[in-house]
Amino acid sequence: MAENILMYKGKPLVKSGNTIYYGYMDEPYVAIIQIKSTREINGEEVADKVTVQLFRTDPAITRLKDKIVKNAERKGLYSALEIGCIWLERELKSSDK
């Protein structure tokens, strides 16, 4: 694994365009965060409207509708990342049982 991967609470964050993948793809679930709009604050562009989805990573599930476990919209990246982190941890714990 590359040494310069950004980690958050022990799980990787990988950005592709306006989408951020949070978690390990070889685990049963991953959080997907999409930045829908941005705004400027003090000359910096920051995420404004953000959606977060908890996805099943099982390749046997082919329908997108069946892969989405939870879905929410949040204002700001931090809020979306926190809810995605909470969902991910809960689902991973329950799938270990």
Image: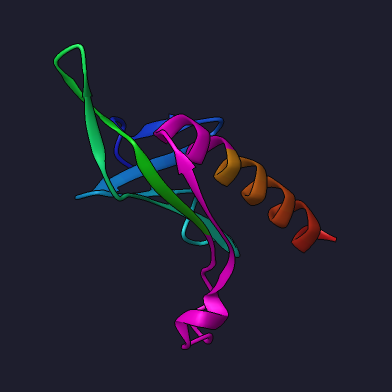
The one nearer the camera, 76 or 32, is 76
With 86 as the anchor, is 66 left or right in this view? Answer: left
Looking at the picture, the colour scheme in use is rainbow
Which corner quadrant of the image does residue 7 belong to?
Answer: top left
Vertical arrangement, residue 56 with respect to residue 5, above or below: below
With 94 as the anchor, is 17 left or right in this view? Answer: left
With 5 as the anchor, is 61 left or right in this view? Answer: right
Q: Which residues are magenta?
A: 54-82
Q: Residue at x 62, y 50 (%)?
A: 88
Q: Residue at x 43, y 40 (%)?
A: 12
The one nearer the camera, 73 or 85, is 73
**How far across and how far down the image is residue 42, in percent?**
20, 11
Vertical arrangement, residue 29 with respect to residue 87, above or below: below
The quarter of the image holding the C terminus is bottom right
Vertical arrangement, residue 27 with respect to residue 19, above or below: below
**How far across and how far down the image is residue 73, in percent?**
49, 50
The quarter of the image holding the N terminus is top left
Instruction: Report the label total.
Output: 0
